[in-house]
Image (cartoon, rainbow, N blue to C red):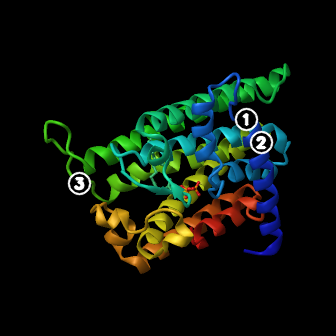
Amino acid sequence: MDSPFLEYLQARRADIEAALAGALPAPPGCPAVVADAMRYSVTAGGKRLRPVLCLASADAVGGDRALAMPAACASELIHTYSLIHDDLPAMDNDTLRRGRPTLHVVAGDGMAILAGDGLLTEAFALLARAPETTDPVIVARKLRVVGLIANAAGAMGMVGGQAIDLACSTADPGGRRAPPLDADGIRVMHARKTGALIRASAVAGAIMGGAGPGTIDQIDAAAAELGLAFQIVDDILDVEGVLAHLGKTPGKDAAAGKPTYPALYGLASARRMAADCLERAETTLRATGLAESRLMDIGRWIVNRSN
Ligand code: GRG
């Protein structure tokens, strides 16, 4: 990563940490027991990829970054909820996340479910209240972003993708299990499970930044490529990554017999596929004059990361 981008990343992350700290519910309005559980997972670290992407999108279209901050934080709150629920014994049953014991390990399954529920709901409360404005143009953008993020997080997006994954990897109480996915099925499952929120984060930033419809569509298309690249690299890291960098248990997908990109195509081809995604994203962004924006730096970060 070149150093201007590293500086940008550090600065945006600092902004995001401060905004997240201010957005999290706290006593006396919120009972301390669930406030603490939510804060435990949100402040455990994490790359903040989705909120950084959201802010970079607003920057790329020349918008006011502050207008995009609530959407940036909402995407991270929703992402963190999804990790808490995914780690539960009823789902992926993981004990380590972001370098810490998972929330259900320290607070119990019930409190982890509630903290996830709280984060998801709080994301939409935040989108409703901020940025605080009566300007009808900004109010219309906010409303559009609420719908966009709801679709990405819900049954048509992340929840739907997780449901497909669960149905294929686990038998239901009647012993029924969905048939294994083919390569196209896997791509669609990931597009929902991880791609949808990544895409929505980038598009929300563009909308709040006041981009026109053509630019929003191009950012959406490029972010879809970045989302796929993210997943492919995540699968590669599951094979090659070390716990100290990942902050979560490596090798879990392979051990669970999950169909990963390296398992399907081999490591070298999977790497090539991630690089191809980046190239397609660049071509798309070039058409809107955004190939030199931070969005492409984020794409390179996604492909070259070690966690
Ligand atoms: C429970 C509704 C529901 C959905 C869960 C996203 C997800 C859906 C499950 C996570 C499973 C998983 C580990 C998928 C691989 C891709 C992924 C989302 C990795 C974690 O995201 P990062 O790398 O994490 O952005 P940090 O900690 O850096 O924020």
Labels 3 and 1 touching (C-beta < 8 A): no
Question: 127 above or below 85?
Answer: above
Q: Nearer the viewer, residue 121 or 107?
A: 107
Instruction: Give amino acid for label 1.
Output: Ala
Residue at image point 49% right, 46% down: 106
Residue at image point 74% right, 41% down: 21
Quadrant where the N terminus sits is bottom right
Residue marked by disc 1: 23
Mark 1 packing: few (<14 Cα in 10 Å), some, or many (20+)?
Answer: some
Q: Which mark is residue 180?
A: 3
Q: Nearer the viewer, mark 3 or mark 2?
A: 2
Q: Secondary structure at mark 2?
A: helix
State the image coordinates of residue 198 (x, y, percent, origin top left): 58, 49
Q: Nearer the viewer, residue 31 or 60?
A: 31
Instruction: Give amino acid for label 3.
Output: Pro
Residue marked by disc 2: 19
Residue farthest bottom in this picture = 268
